[in-house]
Amino acid sequence: MTLSSRTLSHTFLPDTAICDDCLRELFDPTSKRYLYPYIGCPNCGPRYVLMTNLPFERKNTTMAEWEICPSCKEEYEDPQNRRYHAELNCCPDCGPNYYLTVNGERYEGEEMFRRVAELLKNGEILLMKNNGGYHLVCDAFNKEAVQVMRDKLGRPRKSFAIMVKDVEAAKEIVHLSEKEEEILLSKKRPILIAKSKSEELSSIIAPNNPDIGLMVPYTGLQHLLFHFGSPRFIVMTSANYPGEPTIHKDDQLTRLLEDFQCAVLIGEREIERSVDDTVLKVTKLGAVPFRRSRGYNNLLNITLPSSRPILTLGADLKSTITLVKDGHVIMSHHLGDTSKYGTQLKFERAVKDYLNYHGVALSDTIIGHDLHPEYFTTKFAQTLEGYRHVAVQHHKAHLASILALKNKLSEPVVGVIFDGAGYGEDGEIWGGEIFVGSVQEGFARRGHLRKASLIGGDAAATFPLQALAGFIGDFDKELLDRLQLPEPFPKALKIKEKNIRTFPTTSVGRLFDAVAALTGFHLDNSFEGEAAIGLEYLAGQSPIVEEVYPFPWTGEELDYRPLFEEMIQSRLKGTSPSVIARGFHRSLAQAVVDVITALCKEYDTNYAVLSGGVFHNSLLVSDIFDLLKGTNIEIFYDDEAPLGDNCISLGQAAILSAMNND
């Protein structure tokens, strides 16, 4: 069986923002869809979140239960009408609607929207059903409401995304380039991470962070909220507890309602599957997705040749899956953290959907998974009765994903892959990896960050002071005493001395944690990357580079010991933490450039790839590009591929496609 052109054109269509035509009609008093939240047309609105089967036709969506009225049917059948073959076509007479429940009272229509605006302005939190799931919403400038949200969700310091009324409102709180404004208003309508210019707002929704994540309305409902007087800046965060999937069914609300005791804005149209908001940031690498989700097309504009279907299951965090059939590549939206049971169920459902919708038999399919034996995705892969199972090393998959999207499968490159952790081919924890080679010929590990100690295993990712002990624990004891570092640093040193749960690692993610601890970040990481984000923010407070520390490339290792020796001396001399943080970023950038230039010359290539979550750091990337000016080296990137683990399944698929699959 092959994928027909019709099936391909209808495969998992992306959920896009309301179009300008529908927006004009929404506020036109003469239109039958005046103020109707479910307004849409063939050019806009949800698709993937409503599909129950392929092809994309009304009977295969959650709109099947709503019988189309004669007026809407006439539009649907008229080739001259802009709603010709609009599968979700409806109006207030024949379609679903919204209603608000507050303390047992029910509100509809304009009164509903006025009541919502009043609640938000009065500091209330409410649950609101959007196209791909529920959001928790409150006034972003209301400290008390945001703090309640933090307390209830267990997010003491992690940033909340906000929705603003329009671009003019966005420019009041963030700096926007033309490129960023274009992205903010694109059909994807992502959460854009932009540089804050509102200290008041940042202190509430994004503490210790130079950036704010914001988006503009992408549904008729959201436009109506602002139209009826809701605050111009509202927190709009997915309705889920950390790590769990976004709630998208009304019967899943019980726990949140018990915790928040809040009003609920309920949409009558069912959501088949939840989809999170896409998150993008503009760096010198271009528009880089942190999370590839709502708005993206699952069918990628690339080809991966393979004689058999390929199914790859990605990593455990920021998971995605990728299916290759007849060369066509279909990559899922962001599925989440598979350490949580709810996400595991969502993940398994996605695998089933992809195989069923595209008529792929498992017995004929090559299954790819991460090398880590304890990942849920690895264990799940082993339960699938595929043709063959192949483990793919984590960081090689990072590298291959970029090259697949750039259609550079045979191009030799230098790959610098920096992240928090990935299972290495030697059984150790990698995270600062340097490769040479190509997807077609394979990648060779050419170097790495000098090994440090991961004290306490995974706990080192939670306690930056513990990570610091893993990097400088072998330094002179008198010098360490002079630093006067608090717990858990001394305790970690004792654990290291006894070699209890202490493992070698090349993780650059832990390097960032260690430097953050040295410069004063002594909190526990309350979310992934918190210390690293704080370090970038601290570095940004030093506008010029006053210090550059040695971080030598030995030809096989990036040796961090001279780096720490001089940073420690700077700290003991009383150098400002921001100066040290800024110097660290520049020093790491110089080290990356030294590696790239040396290996590009040695292997006669002008191409390099940067991937891994560390390169979400825009200051580091900017420094690397500045230092590469005047060279002929090109850095590959693609705005379809996240630098974090969202891209792993695609990279796995690219590597498997290069193998002999007979």
Image (spheres, rainbow, N blue to C red):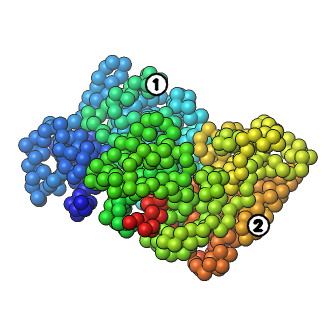
Q: Position of residue 257 (x, y in %)?
A: 42, 24
For the point 25% across and 44% down, the residue is 52
Residue 552 is tagged as 2
User: Dot 1: few (<14), some (14–19), or many (≥20) neighbours within 10 Å?
Assistant: some
Q: Type of residue at label 2?
A: Pro
Q: In the picture shown, does residue 511 fall above or below 117?
A: below
CB within 8 Å, label 1 to label 2 = no
Q: Position of residue 168 (x, y in %)?
A: 44, 51
Residue closer to the observer: 59 or 578? 59
Q: Position of residue 596 (x, y in %)?
A: 64, 72
Q: Type of residue at label 1?
A: Phe
Q: Position of residue 102 (x, y in %)?
A: 35, 22
What quarter of the picture does the N terminus occupy? bottom left
- In this picture, residue 42 sits left or right of residue 145: left
Q: CA distance from mark 1 to mark 2?
A: 53 Å
For the point 81% across and 60% down, the residue is 562
Q: Secondary structure at mark 1?
A: helix
Classify residue 70 by image quadrant.
top left
Residue 3 is tagged as none
For the point 56% across and 28% down, the residue is 151
Q: Secondary structure at mark 2?
A: loop
The residue beneath circle 1 is 260
Q: In the picture shown, does residue 589 fall above or below 577?
A: below
